[in-house]
């Protein structure tokens, strides 16, 4: 409701509980209207009761009874509407939290859509991120997430993805990822920068340093050290099927198996079938 601020019951920095009254607006006009309607309703109810008793005995006109009933019900509905409007002159806390800022002062005009109080709940918070659409098949609600905050090094929080967006942003080709978390120490503040680490790949594939993977006309390859019949090691050129890079590691989907000795040190000094020494 529009109205002049009559009372402010809280101050900045104060903790308030859900449902607690924060501000009360002037309601003198509404109160007068309510009293007027109540007086009319009392009279209308008395008339209706008398007309009903007469009509129950088949005395009088039905029209008089219906008009009395209609007036009573109409005033009753009007009173409910006014009481609802009166309730809108009281601003209550929609949730428990801390009064961070009060924008208006006593005597100023409050209006719908005009901010009056900034109420903050620091206990339960959410972090949002815009993630490239190429990761859409790999990120789902319930996936594990590691939250970190540059302002608090080491204050990492392990939580889960709350939801993923269902619309791709046509401008930057991203979708929304929301992560809810408990701010147990109240250290994290609204609008802080958060880093969200998500696992976009899970598997048991072999990874090797990306720098050792070479390419020729046949494809990607690495060198492995293979033990020959004379108990000597030779370098063997092995073609591999690669997937993608995680950090400085390249995922090998095919070509290597568990137990292969991949040459890392000196990888650029060896050739196929060259004898090598393992140090």
Image (cartoon, helix red, strand yellow):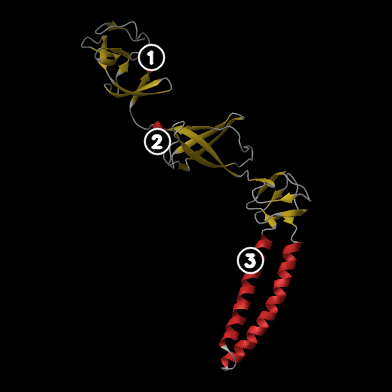
| Res 22 seen here | no
Q: Is residue 157 left or right of residue 98?
A: left
- The image quadrant of residue 257 is top left
| Res 97 seen here | yes
Marks 2/1 in contact by CB < 8 Å: the verdict is no
Dot 2: element: loop
The answer for how far apart the CA atoms under marks 3 and 2 are is 49 Å
Q: Nearer the viewer, mark 3 or mark 2?
A: 3
Q: Residue at x 70, y 72 (%)?
A: 37
Residue 244 placed where, x, y %?
Answer: 36, 24
Q: Is residue 143 left or right of residue 89?
A: left
Q: Residue at x 61, y 74 (%)?
A: 74
Q: Nearer the viewer, mark 2 or mark 1?
A: 2
Which residue does the numbered mark 2 point to in the structure image? Answer: 136
The answer for how far apart the CA atoms under marks 1 and 3 are is 74 Å
Badge 3 local density, few (<14 within 10 Å), some, or many (20+)? Answer: few
Q: Residue at x 60, y 85 (%)?
A: 64
Which residue does the numbered mark 1 point to in the structure image? Answer: 211
Residue 71 placed where, x, y %?
Answer: 62, 77
Which residue does the numbered mark 3 point to in the structure image? Answer: 81
From the viewer's side, name the closer residue of 178 and 148: 178
Upstream in the sequence, badge 1 or badge 3? Answer: 3
């Amino acid at each position: 409701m529009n109205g002049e601020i009559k009372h402010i019951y809280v101050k900045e920095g104060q903790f308030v509980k859900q449902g607690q009254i924060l501000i009360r607006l002037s309601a003198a006009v509404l109160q007068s209207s309510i009293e007027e309607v109540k007086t009319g309703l009392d009279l209308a109810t008395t008339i209706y009761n008398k007309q009903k008793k007469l009509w129950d005995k088949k005395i009088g006109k039905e029209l008089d009874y219906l008009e009395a009933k209609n007036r009573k019900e109409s005033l009753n509905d009007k009173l409910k509407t006014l009481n609802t409007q009166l309730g809108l002159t009281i601003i209550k806390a929609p949730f428990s939290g801390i009064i961070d800022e009060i924008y208006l002062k006593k005597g100023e005009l409050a209006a719908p859509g005009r901010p009056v109080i900034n109420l903050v709940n620091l206990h339960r918070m959410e972090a949002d991120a815009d993630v490239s659409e190429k990761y859409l098949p790999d990120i789902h609600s319930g996936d594990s997430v590691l939250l970190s905050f540059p302002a608090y090094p080491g204050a990492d929080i392990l939580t889960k993805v709350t939801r993923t967006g269902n619309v791709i942003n046509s401008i930057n080709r991203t979708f929304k990822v929301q992560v809810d978390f408990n701010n147990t120490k109240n250290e994290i503040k609204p609008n802080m920068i958060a880093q969200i680490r998500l696992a976009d790949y899970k598997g048991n594939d072999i990874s090797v340093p990306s720098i050792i993977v070479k390419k020729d006309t046949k494809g990607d390859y690495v060198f492995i050290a293979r033990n020959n019949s004379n108990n000597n090691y030779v370098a063997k050129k092995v073609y591999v099927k690669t997937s993608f890079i995680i950090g400085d590691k390249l995922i090998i989907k095919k070509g290597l198996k568990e137990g292969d000795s991949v040459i890392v040190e000196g990888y650029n000094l060896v050739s196929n079938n060259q004898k090598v020494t393992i140090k």
